[in-house]
Amino acid sequence: MSDVKVNSKSLIDQLRNPDVFYTNFYDIMIKDRHKHGEKSLDSNWISDHFLDSLRIVSGNQPVFNFPATLSKLIYLLYFTRRRLEDTSEIYIFDPCGGWFGRQTGLMAAFCMPTFEEIKVHYHCTDVNTMTAGRPEMLHKFWDFYINSRIGTDFDLYRSFAPAERIFDDKFFQDMIGKYDFAFTSPPYFTNEKYSEDENQSYLLYKTYPEWRDGFLKGMIKNTYDLLKPGAQFWLNIADVNTNKGNQQYYPLQNDSVRLAKECGFEHIDTYYMTQHPFPGNESTKNIIKILEKEKKFEPIFLFQKR
Ligand SMILES: C[S@@+](CC[C@H](N)C(=O)[O-])C[C@H]1O[C@@H](n2cnc3c(N)ncnc32)[C@H](O)[C@@H]1O
C-alpha cells in the first residue's frame, strides 16, 4: 500500500526524496505529530506511526484498505435480512479485490451464527500482481488461528483477469448468473496508481471517457451478467478531482449509476461511508453534517439485478 502512487508519488517515493525526508527528519522520526503531538518530543524511539508521520509532513494522501469491520457488518446485515434458512451455499463476487479488506470482513462474518450452516464461495479478481498469494495467505491464517470452518466451508478463488474482461478467465465463463452478491471498490480513474501491471485500468485507458467506457462500463456489465436475478451489487465509488487546479471533478458517481441502470440494474439505495478526517486530503467533494460536525464520505451504491 505504501508503494501506491497518489497524485504521482507514493510514500516510498517520499522516503527516497531527500528534500522531504531530511528537511522533516525530526518530525518524521521522533515528534510523531499524528499520534502524540508535542508530548512525544522527549521520546528517543522511532515512532510506531512512522508512515503516518511521513504522510503528514509530505502532504501525501494515504490509500485505505476497505475497512474489514464495515465489510463484516455489511455482509452480516445483508445476509441476516435475506434469511439464509433455505440456502446451503452462497456465491460472492468482488471484481476489484484490492487489499482484501472485504474478504477479511466476509471471513469474520462467516464465523458468526448467521453463516453457521452455510458454505461460502468467495471469488475475486484484481490485476495487481504485488498482491499475488495474499488472499490465500489470509485464508490460511483465518483457517489456522480463527476458525477451522474457513478451510472446509469457505472456498476462495482469486483471478488476475481485468474486471472488464473477466471472461478471459475461463473459470468465470461457467459462473454466469450464479452469484448471490457482488461488492467492490474499484480504482477511481487515475487517482491511485496501484501497480505497474499492464492491465491496471489507469494504464489501459488514458482519458476519462476512455476509462469510463472501457473499464467502468465493462466492469459493471460483467458483474451484472454474473449475478442471479434479484441479487445485489454494492459499489463504493467516488468522484475525483481532475487536478487541473480548479474544483472540478470527474463524475464517477453519476456515471456509475447511469451505466448500472443502462445494464438493467435498479438503483435501490445509497449509503454514506464516512471517512477519517485527514489533513491535506481535499480530494473529495462529498461532505455531510452529522451532529453539527462536517464529515467526508464516500457513497456506496446499492444496485439490484431485475
Ligand atoms: C480502490 S482499489 C482498492 C483499494 C480499496 N480501497 C479497497 O477496497 O481495498 C482498486 C483495485 O482495483 C485494481 N484494479 C485496477 N485495474 C483493474 C482492472 N482492470 N480489473 C480489476 N481490478 C483492477 C487495483 O489493482 C486496486 O487493487
Image (cartoon, rainbow, N blue to C red):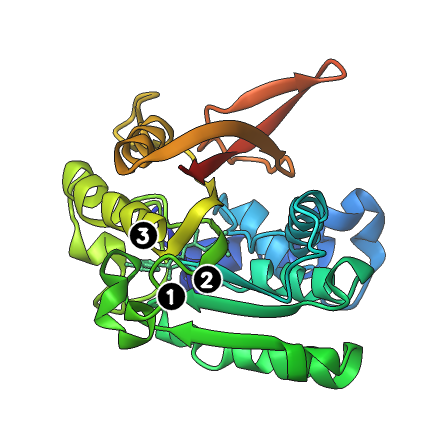
Q: Name the residue located 82 percent from the left edge and 61 percent from the top edge.
A: 113
Which is in the foreground here, disc 3 or disc 1? 3
Q: Name the residue located 28 percent from the left edge and 69 percent from the top edge.
A: 173
Vertical comparison of 135 with 290: above or below: below
Q: Of marks 2 and 3, which one's residue comes earlier in the chain? A: 2
Q: Name the residue located 71 percent from the left edge and 65 percent from the top edge.
A: 110
Amino acid tagged 2? Gly
Residue named by callout 1: 126
Residue named by callout 2: 97
Q: Name the residue located 67 percent from the left edge and 48 percent from the top edge.
A: 70
Q: Of marks 3 and 1, which one's residue comes earlier in the chain? A: 1
Q: Of marks 2 and 1, which one's residue comes earlier in the chain? A: 2
Question: On the rendered structure, is 42 left or right of 287?
Answer: right
Residue named by callout 3: 225
Amino acid tagged 3? Asp
Other residues around mark 1 within 10 Å, as few (<14) / some (14–19) / many (≥20)? many
Question: On the rendered structure, is 14 left or right of 120?
Answer: left
- Secondary structure of the residue carrying tag 2 is loop
Q: Kindly tell me whether residue 48 is visible in this rendering.
A: no
Asked if the residue at tag 1 contacts the one at tag 3, i.e. Cβ–Cβ closer than 8 Å, the answer is no
Asked if the residue at tag 1 contacts the one at tag 2, i.e. Cβ–Cβ closer than 8 Å, the answer is yes
Q: Does the residue labelled 2 lie within 8 Å of ligand 1?
A: yes
- Secondary structure of the residue carrying tag 3 is helix
Q: Is mark 1 within 8 Å of ligand 1?
A: yes
**Real-space Cα distance between discs 2 and 3?**
18 Å
Q: In which quarter of the image is the C terminus?
A: top left
Amino acid tagged 1? Asp
